[in-house]
Amino acid sequence: MGQELLSLENQVAVITGAASGIGAETASLFASAGADVVLGSYRADGYDITPVVEKVESCGQRAVVVELDVRRSESVDSMVAEAMSAFGRIDIMVANAGIARREDLPERVNDAAWETTIDVNLSGVWRCFRAAIPHMRTAGYGRLVATTSVSGPLQAWVGHSAYAASKAGLIGLVGTLAVELGSAGITCNAIAPGVVESPQSLDQVNSLGPQGLAEQARTNPVRRIGTCRDVAVGLLYLASAESGFVNGHVLVMDGGMWLAGSE
Ligand code: NAD
């Protein structure tokens, strides 16, 4: 039998924000492609990680759940240490955890609000990559993938200047790491989803809410919003060995919405 395309067999993936939305779907998809997974779960958000673990195990793969706060280096480092002690390798790091918090007028954004968003969305990704790189370097192989957004790199998101800055900052991080690490067998890429139905986008206060999502579906060129599965499939490609000639790339998955020119 031939080798299956986009197989992650015998590979280990660490996924952050794994208890909900895109991260949860990615964990299941990666397990169905043959990967064992380490699931970074932020306990304070109260998501139940059990269904994710059950899906992974139903694929015959192992799941290790790690309590994680990407704002703390010790927490990120101990997630990576747990992954190494459980599996002895980290092939893939999907730094997906992120937050969106609606702001007041730009001049009223305080230091704490600004710093929290940058800390989770930008520095948090950097901490995850920093912790994984030494193990990938030793192995001579690695796939670093960040979840950015069309909001920031390509579009404005009114009321979300810190979010936009954090997600745009990831493009600089990913591009430079791609060039620094390519010769070590490590690629670094990002996925930039448009509007995807998940706990983040369904949050009426901090994001679009159900009505906003319905409106986006009406105006998107493909007449729907994205699913977590859509994004997980893109992440699977960037996490796979087959994407080895793709490095420093930002994969936009938004149904063509930003080309259509509306926020
Ligand atoms: P989500 O809110 O379900 O996922 C975010 C995850 O990050 C949650 O599991 C949450 O617990 C975790 N998290 C939050 N703070 C954390 C911390 N300090 N430490 C560790 N984990 C933490 O929503 P989602 O849509 O699945 O979001 C996943 C990623 O996709 C995020 O980076 C988000 O910004 C990005 N994104 C989402 C959309 C969308 O429309 N849903 C669009 C573009 C980008």
Image (cartoon, rainbow, N blue to C red):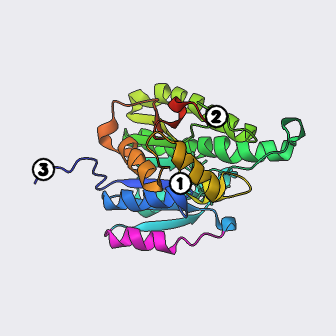
Residue 198 position (above or below residue 5): below
Q: Quadrant of the N terminus?
A: bottom left
The magenta region covers 46-60
Q: Nearer the viewer, mark 3 or mark 2?
A: 2
| Residue at screen point 65% across, 67% down | 43
In the image, is 239 to the left or to the right of 159? left
Identified by mark 1, the residue type is Val
Labelled disc at residue 80: 1
Circle 3 residue:
2
Residue at image location 67% in from the left, 33% down from the top: 156
Query: Marks 3/2: CA distance?
Result: 41 Å
Residue with the mark numbered 2: 152
Q: Reply above or below: 142 against 43.
A: above
Identify the amino acid type marked 3: Gly
Question: What crowding class fits label 1: few (fewer than 14 Cα within 10 Å), some (14-19), or many (20 or more)?
Answer: many
Q: Where is residue 189 in the image (x, y as percent from the top left)?
A: 47, 36
Residue at 50% x, 74% y: name it.
50
Residue 70, percent across and down? 65, 52
**Badge 3, how many Cα within 10 Å: few under 14, some, many 20+?**
few
User: Which amino acid type is shown beneath numbered disc 2?
Assistant: Gly
